[in-house]
Image (cartoon, helix red, strand yellow):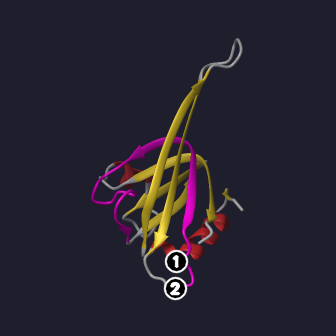
Amino acid sequence: MWNEIKTNDDIKLLMDATGQFGDMSTAEAKYSSCSVNWPEKTPQQYFSTLNVIFRSSDIDEPYNNDIEIEFQEIERMNFNKKTALLHTANTDACLFIHEGLIYWVAGWSENPSIDDIKNSDVTWLSCKAAKWRVLDS
């Protein structure tokens, strides 16, 4: 069952389910994008999605399930190999909503300012919508 992320309560539910991503690493990531030409008088629309599967490395914890997050309508992504979603354990990560966008930031345990994010070299993304689910073992 997919859980949409629309509010801070939705974010808290995800963070509680993952143990704040403390010992989770990325098992798989898939990016897709497309553009659509609608009928007359409508500008071309672009859509991009990033699906990420996070896996816990601690089988003794209650949140040891795999979690998939689908980031939809991505506005911006910044990847740095030192804090990438794609290959290391996420020792710190935060997820928050700012001005209608959902932000995922690796390498931060608290919600940073948008200027701090944009002026840093950490891995982060912003998107218009997101949802998550626990994957069956």
Residue at position x 52%, y 42% in the image: 74
Q: Which residue is mark 1?
A: 19
The kind of residue tagged 1 is Gly
Closer to us: 121 or 49: 49
Residue 19 in sight here? yes
Identify which amino acid the numbered label 2 is placed on.
Glu
Q: Is residue 98 above or below residue 74?
A: below
Name the residue located 58 percent from the left edge and 52 percent from the top edge.
70
Mark 1 is surrounded, within 10 Å at the Cα level, by few (under 14), some (14 to 19) or many (20 or more) other residues, namely: some
Residue 112 visible from this viewpoint:
no
* Mark 2 crowd level (few <14, some 14–19, many ≥20, 10 Å Cα): few
Q: Nearer the viewer, residue 11 or 53?
A: 53
CA gap between label 1 and label 2 equals: 9 Å
Relative image position of residue 98 (x, y in whole percent): 55, 53
Where are the magenta residues, as a range? 62-90
Q: Which residue is mark 2?
A: 61
Residue 51 pos. (x, y %):
53, 51
Q: Quadrant of residue 136?
A: bottom right
Q: Nearer the viewer, mark 1 or mark 2?
A: 2
Considering only vertical position in the picture, is 86 above or below 43? below
Relative image position of residue 101 (x, y in whole percent): 57, 48
On the image, which quarter does residue 44 sit in?
top right
Q: Residue 75 lies in magenta, yes or no?
A: yes
Give the quarter of the figure containing the C terminus: bottom right
| Residue 49 picture quarter | top right
Residue at image coords 69%, 59%: 2
- Helix, strand or loop for disc 1: helix
